[in-house]
């Protein structure tokens, strides 16, 4: 077997990433009018002092309303691709560390074995001061399948588990904060 | 039993920077303090955005032709391939680039470094890789600039690159450095990757074959993303 190539290390996005990465239109994943329940996810990013992080970038990847990813590796024949939904979004925090993204609630997607994964959005999180991205997921508080979700079930500490669950904050609005350190520190994934 | 979901390989120890690296002071209040939760890959991790339909917008591969005049600085060509660990090309993936100008100043309101902006240089571009996984940019060599990480600290000249690859877990944002830069030795961001063989991946090669006579210097810079863990899994 041929020797493997060594992967390129990540390096921080730094404070000036908006120059190359900020695409305000990508914060509206409903801009092509996809099928599904419209939701807004909003929140703040806070550092270890509880101070807002004004230079974070949140990338989102999710299935469509039927629970299918727009990707060739997703071969679920019983679910349709939605031509109006790519599933990828991106939003940067503002000067107060706030962000808001518009999307649709994803459908449940299969997990390993016979497991079903509760509706969730996959997150890659970047910031000045992070040498490479963090990964986490956003779940939705009003989904009964959260109780049997394989990832949520893996997290024994209820407080840590709850950091992955966006809470309802008005009609169609969910609140999800990224807390980088401290008592309410967001659970991040080793994937 | 074989996995239903082909996973991506995990990173080797030391092959990526740690989250907490106090020499880079901003990591101290931003690195997670809890142990990351290990989770096996599912469809959610092995899928990711694809850019074949052109929705990411038109290519912008010549950063020297985005304004009326030519930017100041040393004109360079930067090209390379996006590969996985098994040297398979990553086709049709988005490559995003941003950088400061030749004087070491970003076209960004937060950058207050006392160096001139260049009205003929913004410093952002994007490309989609071809069937060999190749990208190519024409730009100018960025300058070094001071930052407040420690007294009299200077960042080595660098380009910022973002690449996607096959799945959401292959996402990479990195920086490309220039060979022979004396500032690399002092730069905690560069030095944060413990494994030297991985770290030197961040330094482009000067390649006279890529230079164009009387016009521009050529640099080769490949980026290698996480590869498949087990059974090869061809995505057509």
Image (cartoon, rainbow, N blue to C red):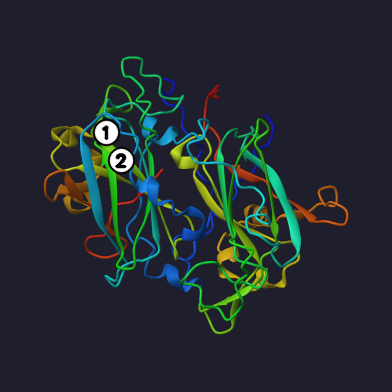
Q: Which residue is mark 2?
A: A121
Inspect this view and state whether residue A59 appears.
no
Badge 1 local density, few (<14 within 10 Å), some, or many (20+)? many
In the displayed structure, does residue B4 sit left or right of residue B172? left
Q: Residue at x 12, y 45 (%)?
A: A171
In the displayed structure, does residue A87 sit left or right of residue A151? right
Question: Does label 1 or label 2 sit earlier along the sequence?
Answer: 1
Chain to which the residue tagged by mark 1 belongs: A
Q: Secondary structure at mark 1?
A: loop
Against A173, is B68 above or below?
Answer: below
Real-space Cα distance between discs 1 and 2?
A: 7 Å
Residue B96 percent coordinates (x, y): 56, 49
Residues behind callouts 1 and 2 on a single chain? yes
For this rendering, which residue is in front, A80 or A127? A80
Against B101, is B150 above or below?
Answer: below
Badge 2 local density, few (<14 within 10 Å), some, or many (20+)? many
Figure quadrant of residue B45: top left
Q: Residue at x 33, y 32 (%)?
A: A63
Whether pointer 1 and pointer 2 mark residues with C-beta atoms closer than 8 Å, the reply is yes
Quarter of the rendering occupied by the N terminus of chain A: top right
For this rendering, which residue is in front, A76 or B102? B102
Q: Residue at x 36, y 66 (%)?
A: A54
Inspect this view and state whether residue B141 appears.
yes
In the rendered image, the residue lying farthest to the right is B213
Q: Which mark is residue A106?
A: 1
Residue B47 percent coordinates (x, y): 43, 32
In the displayed structure, does residue A189 sit left or right of residue B173? left
Residue A75 percent coordinates (x, y): 40, 19
Residue B51 percent coordinates (x, y): 51, 35
Q: Which mark is residue B236?
A: none
Quarter of the rendering occupied by the C terminus of chain A: top left
């Amino acid at each position: 077997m041929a020797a493997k190539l060594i992967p390129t290390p990540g390096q921080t996005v730094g404070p000036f990433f908006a120059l190359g990465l900020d695409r305000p239109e990508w914060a509206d994943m409903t801009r092509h009018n996809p099928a599904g329940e419209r939701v807004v996810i909003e929140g703040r990013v806070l550092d270890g002092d509880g101070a807002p992080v004004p230079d974070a970038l949140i990338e989102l990847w999710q299935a469509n309303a039927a629970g299918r990813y727009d990707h060739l590796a997703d071969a679920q024949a019983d679910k349709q691709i939605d031509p109006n939904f790519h599933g990828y979004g991106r939003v940067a925090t503002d000067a107060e560390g706030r962000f808001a993204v518009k999307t649709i609630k994803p459908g449940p997607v299969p997990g390993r074995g016979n497991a079903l994964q509760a509706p969730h959005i996959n997150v890659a999180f970047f910031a000045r001061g992070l040498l490479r991205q963090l990964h986490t997921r956003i779940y939705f508080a009003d989904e009964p399948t959260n109780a049997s979700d394989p990832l949520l079930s893996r997290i024994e500490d209820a407080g840590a588990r709850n950091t992955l669950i966006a809470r309802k904050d008005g009609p169609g609005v969910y609140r999800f904060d990224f807390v980088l350190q401290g008592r309410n520190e967001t659970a991040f994934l080793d994937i | 039993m074989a996995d239903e979901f082909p996973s991506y390989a995990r990173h080797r120890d030391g092959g990526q920077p740690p989250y907490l690296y106090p020499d880079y002071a901003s990591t101290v209040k931003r690195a997670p303090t809890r142990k990351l939760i290990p989770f096996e890959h599912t469809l959610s991790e092995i899928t990711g955005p694809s850019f074949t339909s052109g929705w990411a917008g038109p290519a912008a591969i010549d950063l020297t032709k985005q304004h009326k005049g030519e930017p100041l600085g040393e004109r360079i060509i930067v090209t390379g391939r996006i590969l996985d660990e098994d040297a398979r090309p990553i086709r049709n993936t988005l490559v995003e680039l941003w950088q400061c100008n030749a004087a070491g100043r970003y076209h960004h309101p937060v950058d207050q470094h006392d160096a001139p902006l260049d009205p003929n240089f913004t410093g952002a571009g994007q490309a989609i890789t071809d069937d060999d996984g190749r990208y190519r940019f024409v730009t100018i060599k960025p300058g070094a600039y001071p930052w407040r990480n420690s007294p009299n600290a200077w960042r080595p000249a660098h380009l910022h690159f973002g690449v996607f690859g096959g799945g959401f877990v292959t996402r990479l944002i990195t920086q490309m450095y220039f060979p022979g830069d004396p500032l690399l030795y002092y730069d905690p961001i560069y030095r944060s990757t413990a494994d030297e063989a991985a770290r030197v991946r961040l330094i482009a090669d000067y390649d006279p074959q890529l230079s164009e006579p009387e016009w521009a210097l050529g640099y080769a810079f490949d980026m290698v993303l996480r590869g498949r863990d087990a059974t090869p899994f061809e995505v057509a």
